[in-house]
Image (cartoon, rainbow, N blue to C red):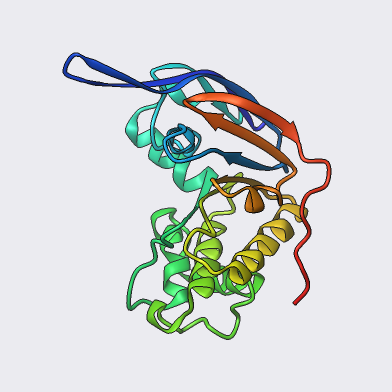
Amino acid sequence: MLIQATRLTKSYKSGLTETVALEDVSFDIKTGEFVAIMGPSGSGKSTLMHMLGALDTPTSGTYLLDGEDISTLSDDELAEIRNKKIGFVFQAFNLLPRTSALKNVMLPMVYGGVPKEKRTDLATKYLRMVGLGDRLLHTTSQLSGGQMQRVAIARALAMNPSIILADEPTGNLASVQGEEIMAIFKKLNAEGHTIIMITHEPDIAAHAERIIAIRDGRLITNRNNKSPKERKKH
């Protein structure tokens, strides 16, 4: 089992006030699944995303990634997990401005210790995978929103992670661009990548094989999606 989340709870204290953002949430995710974690604003899905991405640890409960208890690791160990096992795709792209698509994709490899001579080849390979083989040297200012998100996906693949964790990946895109991004995720999933996507949009969640719904910090649905949405042909 790739992910085992057991009774995850996260609370925050401010003075005498305690706010529970996530309460008693449990689920498993197998290698190769495409899972959508869905919920409205304030539901706790972002808190859960931070835990799954090793950006935060639970107040109580356990989170096992590849059998390793993430909730017990130090900040340095969490950083290493993030770099090697999790590829992030964010709503705001989080790309370096005035920097080429190629260099943006190479950046995690620099931190990950990939030899310099391999970085260009790998970055080129991943940009071609997302359909940007002709945009390698374009800077972010020369790319559309959909193209920037493709660069972000290529960057997420840079260290060949166990998981692609996408936080509202279509939130800043027009619907047609959003469908194109979902088609890329489905292709990557078909090739064996585990995709976990955070979204508040039912239409986007409908692409996943399984939907986990969070409301008021609690898990309310964990169901297989019998007929994942197919991308419309344009």
Observer able to see residue 118 = no
Asked if residue 66 lies left or right of residue 188, the reply is left
Residue reaching furthest left? 15
Asked whether, in this view, residue 171 is left or right of residue 203, the answer is: left
* Picture coordinates of residue 14, whole percent (x, y): 20, 22
Residue 101 on image: x %, y %: 46, 75
* Quadrant (top left, top right, bottom left, bottom right) of the C terminus: bottom right
Q: Is residue 221 visible?
A: yes
In the depicted view, which residue is nearer to us: 86 or 212?
A: 212
Q: Residue 35 sits in which quadrant?
A: top right
Q: How many marks?
A: 0
Residue 24 percent location from the top left of the image: 52, 16
Q: Residue at x 39, y 40 (%)?
A: 79
* Placement of 82 over or under 155, stated as above or below: above
Along the viewing direction, whichever of 64 and 51 lies nearer the viewer: 51
Front-most of residues 137 and 93: 93
Relative vertical location of residue 153 with respect to residue 81 in this rendering, above or below: below
| Residue 147 % position (x, y) | 53, 74
Q: Nearer the viewer, residue 213 or 118?
A: 213
Q: Quadrant of residue 41?
A: top left
Q: Is residue 132 left or right of residue 44?
A: right
The quadrant in which the N terminus is found is top right
**Would you say 179 lies left or right of 69 here?**
right
